[in-house]
């Protein structure tokens, strides 16, 4: 949470500066408070339930999922996952049946939350030792790739705002295919790999949260530099490559000097359970 709050604060300052210059509407107090509290709130510009740092929309779903999952922590792992999946399914059915008008209730009951159930299922399969031979993994991934490539939502031709990104269309056209691709990767029979490339990939994985939150900052800054230096004559793709490298570099730096220290500090404040309790919880099937 601290890293998201930092990103939100940065984008809040940018929004306030833009409002002072008359370029955008200033965020309301409700928008500001809800952004820091992970609560869906309609933004003034278009009424969409998006926080000040717009990428935080996914985190609002995640916080809801964590809250639901916490209600089942007293159960063994398999039963907890089944209970969470059943509750998420019931919540989505209630959304379809009652069409809640409250923006938070409507948001948290969107069909996109079913993707959490897919993720839990893949995790259970991996923990159980299920592994797919290469041919089976390929058979799982190729149809999913075909669905994504066919673009059934017409997202390539339609503006993003014209889509229903969190409804059943998204779940079946994006979420389920991506879950199949992910499962084909993590469940594939493979030997552990080492080496510089894998260590770098692991480092980027550790910094993925920072990369998600702060890559817009790197892209915006680099684009301004690119235009100011008249580098646009080199074309579009050099900017894409430079933005990608800058985003990764910024994420690695933020993880090393901000996220890790903040995480360590937060962990030091938490009340630690006795080692026996932790071992018992970890041993639950």
Image (cartoon, helix red, strand yellow):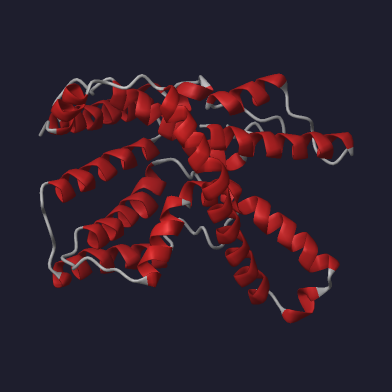
Q: Residue at x 58, y 60 (%)?
A: 249
Name the outermost residue toward the right. Answer: 21
Up the image or down, 35 lies above or below 71; here it is below
Q: Residue at x 36, y 50 (%)?
A: 175
**The image quarter in which residue 199 lies:** bottom left
Q: Residue at x 19, y 63 (%)?
A: 188
Q: Where residue 224 appears, x then y in whole percent? A: 78, 60
**The image quarter in which residue 28 lies:** top right
Q: Where residue 216 appears, x then y in whole percent? A: 63, 52
Horizontal arrangement in the rendering, residue 145 relative to residue 46 (left or right): left
**The image quarter in which residue 201 lies:** bottom left
Q: Is residue 53 visible?
A: yes
Front residue of this view, candidates 98 and 129? 129
Q: Where residue 72 appears, x then y in whole percent? A: 23, 22
Which image quarter is the C terminus in? top left
Q: Where residue 23 appears, x then y in whole percent? A: 85, 41
Front residue of this view, candidates 266 and 104? 266
Name the outermost residue toward the bottom. Answer: 234
Up the image or down, 33 lies above or below 203; here it is above
Q: Is residue 94 visible?
A: no
Up the image or down, 47 lies above or below 243; here it is above
Q: Residue at x 73, y 28 (%)?
A: 27
Q: How many marks?
A: 0
Horizontal arrangement in the rendering, residue 112 relative to residue 278 (left or right): right
């Amino acid at each position: 949470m601290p890293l998201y709050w930092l990103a939100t604060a940065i984008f809040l300052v940018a929004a306030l500066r833009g409002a002072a210059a008359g370029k955008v509407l200033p965020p309301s107090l409700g928008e500001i408070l809800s952004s820091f509290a992970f609560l869906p709130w309609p933004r003034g510009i278009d009424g969409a339930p998006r926080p000040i740092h717009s990428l935080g929309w996914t985190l609002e779903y995640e916080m809801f999922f964590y809250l639901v999952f916490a209600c089942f922590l007293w159960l063994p792992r398999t039963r907890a996952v089944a209970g969470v999946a059943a509750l998420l399914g019931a919540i989505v059915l209630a959304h379809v049946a009652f069409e809640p008008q409250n923006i938070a209730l409507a948001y948290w009951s969107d069909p996109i939350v079913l993707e959490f159930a897919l993720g839990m299922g893949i995790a259970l399969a991996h923990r159980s030792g299920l592994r797919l031979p290469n041919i089976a993994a390929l058979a799982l991934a190729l149809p999913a790739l075909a669905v994504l490539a066919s673009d059934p939502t017409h997202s390539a031709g339609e503006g993003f705002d014209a889509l229903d990104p969190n409804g059943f269309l998204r779940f079946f056209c994006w979420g389920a295919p991506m879950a199949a691709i992910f499962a084909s990767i993590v469940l594939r029979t493979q030997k552990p790999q080492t080496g510089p490339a894998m260590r770098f990939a692991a480092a980027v994985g550790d910094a993925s949260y920072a990369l998600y939150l702060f890559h817009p900052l790197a892209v915006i800054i680099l684009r301004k530099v690119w235009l100011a230096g008249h580098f646009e004559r080199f074309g579009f793709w050099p900017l894409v490559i430079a933005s990608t490298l800058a985003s990764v570099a910024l994420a690695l730096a933020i993880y090393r000097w901000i996220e890790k220290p903040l995480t360590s500090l937060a962990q030091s404040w938490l009340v630690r359970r006795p080692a026996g309790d932790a071992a018992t919880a970890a041993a639950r099937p």
